[in-house]
Image (tube, rainbow, N blue to C red):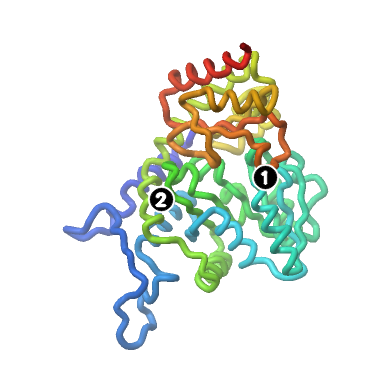
Amino acid sequence: TMDEAEFSRAARLAHLRGAGLAKGDPIAPPLVMASTYHLPGDPAGVSHQYGRPDNPTVEALEAALGLLEGAEAIAFPSGMAAISAAFFALLKAGDRVLVPSDGYYTTRLVADRFLKAFGIVADTRPTATFADGGFAGYRMVYVETPSNPMLDICDLAAIARGAHEAGALVVADNTTMTPYGQRPLDLGADIVVAADTKAPNGHSDVLFGHAATRDAGTAEAIRAWRKLAGGIPGPFEAWLVHRGLETLELRFDRMCGTAESLAPRIAAHPAVGAVRYPGLPGDPSHNLARTQMNRFSFLVGLTLQSADAAERFIAGCPLIQPSTSFGGVHTSAERRARWGDAVAPGYVRLSVGCEPAEDLWKAIEASLDDLRD
């Protein structure tokens, strides 16, 4: 469960903007749609000069994300934009980077197609054995835990210690957990990246991301990359994510609590071959998850007999939305092998939403029962 510090962050987040308001100011952050600002004379020292680097709505969201991360947050138009910024702002020709072989596949594609072209070598390792072999020779160690889609876990604190001893920066993709579920910076990571497209926004209507770090020089480099390369977020998207973020603690608690109650029942169903969920006592990640994570996540991985069985299960459940991505208020699922992930053909990544838990279970159970007919 969340500790007292997490609840304190959630409480302060709700009043973050209110602390600086003058009488008559709007309580909700205004949506500022501006590419230019009134700028006569010498522009030095003016806080808002041009829309590419400066926007008050984006800054309000960065302040909220920064409160949750306990770090400086830099907003991006997608999770991959944040990940790419961490790569391109901090790596140079001749550097080596280590990325998970079983994490989000687009990260590997960026490394293979684009980093390689700039003379940066990317190696891969499985998340569950990520520390094996050490980190000598690496400039950056990039981890994703739990990994997407198989939900393997690696020891963030131990990896951070080993990577720092080898002189490497540690970047942690925390998309599956959010700052409420896991705190990589507290465990030693230098940079957190995340797709706020998922649970932080939560309503399946925005692409967004952020990077966060407690090192001023690293933050300046990432912010400068965003400003100069132009991968900037839009103010309307930032406004929507700010709105979603205000209910993240409530939604995340509901989603994780429901997932924790469903996972053992799904695992016990005769149509299900295997279940991956860090909250299950028999899961290989369980002991580490108990020490490293505040919650066990809202994602459940289940393996059915075949690709056809997986598709029938998803299509046959009226409370499951068949879609890619995760973290929405609606429960969703997809057969991940269709994207080329190295998983069984019948492996389903289930993202538990905010529906009442027992209604959701009844619908899932009925769809699983139909597989035995």
Query: Which residue bears the numbered disc 1?
Result: 103
Q: Residue at x 21, y 60 (%)?
A: 22
In the rendered image, the residue lying farthest to the bottom is 41
For the residues bearing labels 2 and 1, Cβ distance under 8 angstroms: no
For label 1, the SS is: loop
Q: Residue at x 53, y 50 (%)?
A: 195
Q: In the figure, residue 239 lies in which quadrant?
A: bottom left
Residue 140 on image: x %, y %: 70, 59
Quarter holding the C terminus?
top right
Q: Residue at x 33, y 46 (%)?
A: 14
Q: Give the amino acid type for the residue marked by disc 2 in the picture.
A: Val
Residue 335 on image: x %, y %: 62, 33
In the rendered image, the residue lying farthest to the right is 133
Q: In the drawing, what numbered circle is on residue 46?
A: none
Earlier along the polypeptide chain: callout 2 or callout 1?
Answer: 1
Query: Which residue bears the numbered disc 2?
Result: 241
Q: Give the amino acid type for the residue marked by disc 1 in the picture.
A: Gly
The answer to whether 81 is drawn above or below residue 175 in the figure is below
373 left or right of 240 in image: right
Comparing 63 with 3, the one in front is 63
Q: In the figure, residue 345 lies in which quadrant?
A: top right
In the rendered image, the residue lying farthest to the left is 24
Q: CA distance from mark 2 to mark 1?
A: 24 Å
Q: Residue at x 37, y 45 (%)?
A: 246
Residue 100: tell me if it is visible.
yes
Few, some or many residues within 10 Å of mark 2 (<14, 14–19, 20+): many
Residue 296: tell me if it is visible.
no
Q: How many badges with numbers are in the image?
A: 2
Few, some or many residues within 10 Å of mark 1 (<14, 14–19, 20+): many
Residue 261 on image: x %, y %: 52, 21
Comparing 11 with 274, the one in front is 274
